[in-house]
Amino acid sequence: MRGGGEMVNSACPIFAQSRAVRIVRLEKMRAAGIGWGMWKVYGYAKCDSCRRARRFLTERGVIFEELAIRETPPTPGELSGALATFDGNVRRLFNTAGGDYKTLGLSAKLPTMSVDDAIALLAGNGNLVKRPFVVVENGRFFAGFDEASWAAALSPSVVAQ
């Protein structure tokens, strides 16, 4: 598990504490139904968006688990949950700029592919999944890193006491 160094950031009351205190606070927030909880971040070490996302979460003291997307792709259940979040737009789950996507000719195949087949393909090949792919304990999902939307999404848990 990764998350938050021991630097102090006075703008974030959660980040300004030791990691052990943050974990206890996270447990209290979970019990009270406040905040986001644990973040599971699927990424790739050489991916710039993944590195920016990791830095963003660490700077804000978000507790997250980081998984290598190539070796451990998201599960079919996680991908299906994200698909519901993205209003059924399966293309939003794919790394359309990736080599595997292009090699497999998915731009032509995806429009006629069933959702089950697309989910199975993504769950079997982490290179095809848009990175970083994030599963948040509260049921939210993100595919790709957009700092503005992540900051807006985090604001309720950052200000929670």
Image: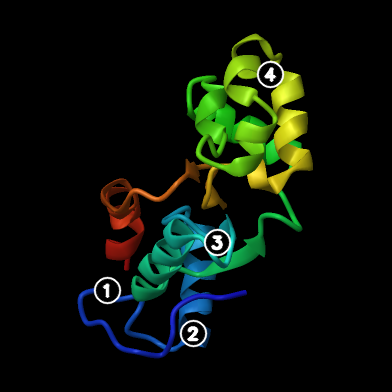
Distance from Cα at disc 3 to Cα at disc 4: 28 Å
Q: Is residue 142 above or below residue 160?
A: above
Find disc 1 in the rendering and name its residue.
12
Disc nearer the start of the sequence (4/1): 1
Quarter occupied by the C terminus: bottom left
Q: Residue 21's x, y, as percent?
A: 47, 84
Q: Which mark is residue 38?
A: 3
Q: For the residues carrying marks 3 and 4, which lies nearer the camera in this image?
A: 4
Q: For the residues carrying marks 2 and 4, which lies nearer the camera in this image?
A: 4
Look at 46% across and 78% down and name the residue there.
Answer: 22
Q: Residue 127's x, y, as percent?
A: 66, 47
Quarter occupied by the N terminus: bottom right
Q: Is residue 106 above or below residue 141?
A: above
Distance from Cα at disc 4 to Cα at disc 1: 40 Å
Residue 23 in view of the camera: yes
Q: Is residue 136 above or below residue 28?
A: above
Q: Which mark is residue 47?
A: none
Look at 34% across and 89% down and name the residue there.
Answer: 7
Q: Residue 108's x, y, as percent?
A: 60, 16
Identity of the residue furthest to the top in this view: 112
Which amino acid type is marked by label 2?
Arg
Distance from Cα at disc 3 to Cα at disc 2: 13 Å
Find disc 4 in the rendering and name its residue.
115
Identity of the residue furthest to the front in this view: 103
Q: Nearer the viewer, residue 78 or 38?
A: 78
Q: Are marks 2 and 4 in contact (CB under 8 Å)?
A: no
Find disc 2 in the rendering and name its residue.
19
Distance from Cα at disc 3 to Cα at disc 1: 17 Å
On the picture, is 147 further left or further right than 115? left
Q: Is residue 53 above or below residue 25?
A: above
Disc nearer the start of the sequence (2/1): 1
Distance from Cα at disc 2 to Cα at disc 4: 40 Å
